[in-house]
Amino acid sequence: MNNRVGAVIVAAGKGSRMGTPESKQYLLLEGKPILVHTLLQFEQMTLIDEIVLVVGTQDVERCTAWIKTYGLQKITKIVAGGAERQFSVYQGLLALNADWVFIHDGVRPFVTEERVRACYEAAVRHGAAVLAVQVKDTIKQVNEAGRIEHTPDRRSLWAIQTPQAFRYADVVRAHEEAQREQFVGTDDSMLVERLGLPVYVVEGDYTNIKITTPDDLVSAEFWLQQMREEQK
């Protein structure tokens, strides 16, 4: 029996670091909203059976219109998110019909099908997996006074990305347990870790950037140009 694989794309946040009146996920990147670039990436992935999109209540209507405009056939539902990203993800999960699920940021438009498939295969082997890259800089642990207390070994440090892949039942249970305990984590894998379940890292790409600042937008435009050159 084949596993049904779904994706929850989260784009309900406002974000202030971009410094624009429009939410970052709706800013145009070469004529299309950043979010649409992300959705089109997942739309063309043969692994993905279904997509649930989570957006702000005020954005449901325009995102619904984009389904037809951009031929997004795999989006089965658009749901309104909550006050925190974690609550938005949970609403998306409830709307999904899948055995395995990817949870992905709507402002990461450059993830590749190759990496997504590798993440899925690791999740099936281990129960949960996340894309990540090794940190390039030396990291310091600093106290409130600004004094360095510890320098961890850089080889053991990874910057976590999305998508993150989970057995559907496990990640739903992790979210519900967090709600019961009024715990808000920094990402979905953290909630699964709290259940005592293993989560494995799969090497991602440094180009899988999260577009949150004006500098990120400049980088995104550069990567799109590079991709076009490579396709010639």
Image (cartoon, rainbow, N blue to C red):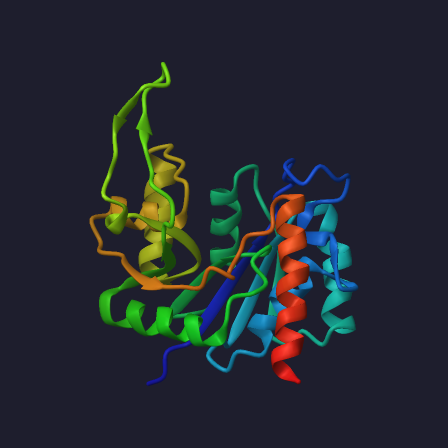
Residue nearest the viewer, comparing 155 with 169: 155
Picture coordinates of residue 80 (x, y %)? Answer: 63, 49
Q: Residue at x 38, y 57 (%)?
A: 133
Picture coordinates of residue 153 (x, y %)? Answer: 23, 43
Q: Residue at x 79, y 64 (%)?
A: 31
Image quarter (top left, top right, bottom left or bottom right) of the C terminus: bottom right
Q: Is residue 86 left or right of residue 38?
A: left
Q: Is residue 204 left or right of residue 65?
A: left
Measured along the vertical axis of the image, is residue 220 above or below residue 179? below
The extreme top residue here reads 145
Picture coordinates of residue 44 (x, y %)? Answer: 58, 79
Image quarter (top left, top right, bottom left or bottom right) of the N terminus: bottom left
Picture coordinates of residue 49 (x, y %)? Answer: 50, 77
Residue nearest the viewer, comparing 113 with 98: 113
Q: Residue at x 63, y 70 (%)?
A: 226
Which quadrant of the figure has residue 148? top left
Q: Residue at x 36, y 34 (%)?
A: 183
Measured along the vertical axis of the image, is residue 8 above or below residue 113? above
Q: Is residue 33 left or right of residue 89?
A: right
Residue nearest the viewer, comparing 137 with 73: 137
| Res 96 seen here | no
Which quadrant of the figure has residue 231? bottom right
Q: How many marks?
A: 0
| Res 46 seen here | yes
Measured along the vertical axis of the image, is residue 184 above or below residue 163? above
